[in-house]
Image: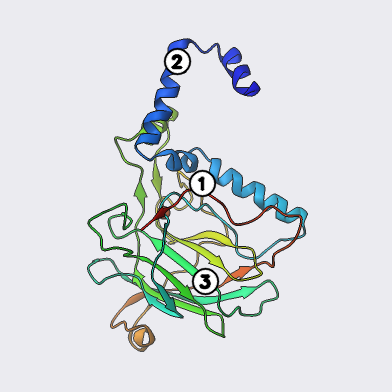
Amino acid sequence: MRDLFYTIEELDVQPDEFWTALNYLGEAGKSGELGLLAAGLGFEHFLDLRLDEAEARAGIEGGTPRTIEGPLYVAGAPLAEGHARLDDGSDPGETLVMRGRVLGEDGKPLANALVEVWHANHLGNYSYFDPSQAAFNLRRSIRTGADGHYSFRSVVPVGYSVPPQGQTQRLLDQLGRHGHRPAHIHFFISAPGFRKLTTQINIDGDPYLWDDFAFATREGLVPVVKQAEGAQGKPYGVDGNFALIDFDFTLFRDRDNLPGAEVDRVRAEA
Ligand SMILES: [Fe+2]
């Protein structure tokens, strides 16, 4: 509060400016865009950097980088063992297979780890928030087997933008910034006794790869997208050509005297 009062003094904020700001926040709340604002103004990435720093002080370095959750997770996605198909076959995007292992910091595979994955469709829209998609389309929870492996079949997502008429875009316009995100796939990776990892991978080659309005792209989260075909697709029920991503996730053991990696925030629940 002291800092806000100082800001009013420093910027000589007039009453109509104060109420404009308050009304703006009210409108952004009403349209459900506060989560977008937090991402777009860099707050969510800043909080990630602070967690990174706390972990580094505790001797945790390396492993899979975290990056922002964003506001579009939905709890309760169907659970699969080892492998899942995320799409319902109606999306015309390029077929994607992503596979890998969940590892502990010692490099040993983690059985019974949970890979929660969600991403946008070929139009850049997320199920639940886009009611034209089936429930939990492009959202699954995948449990790793004894060898720590997970895999899923889906379609290659594309990037998306904040609502063009919304409050976030209105502010970005005034800041001279765009509201585009490069194509990406979201993950929560968790296992008993390990720090939960919130992260994303980016689809290489996207024009906004290193110009994300949410500042979420990080070194180590842009895997190579291989072109695969024929027999390679058999284990995943894929015929013909498809995009293939190999990616391992590394988790760190729970430690005392460290801020929790599990973030408590309001999330959608279907
Ligand atoms: Fe996203």
Relative to the observer, which residue lies in front, 235 or 142? 142
When the figure is inspected, residue 103 is found, relative to residue 46, above or below; the finding is: below
Q: Earlier in the sequence, mark 2 or mark 1?
A: 2
Q: Which residue corresponds to mark 3?
A: 114
The amino acid pointed to by label 2 is Glu
When the figure is inspected, residue 135 is found, relative to residue 98, above or below; the finding is: above
Q: Earlier in the sequence, mark 2 or mark 3?
A: 2
What secondary structure is marked by label 2? helix
Q: Position of residue 258 (x, y in %)?
A: 72, 54
Q: Which residue corresponds to mark 2?
A: 17
The amino acid pointed to by label 3 is Leu
Q: Position of residue 150 (x, y in %)?
A: 48, 77
Query: Mark number for residue 79?
Result: none
Q: Which residue corresponds to mark 1?
A: 215
Q: Position of residue 91 (x, y in %)?
A: 25, 66
Residue under the point 63% across and 48% down: 49
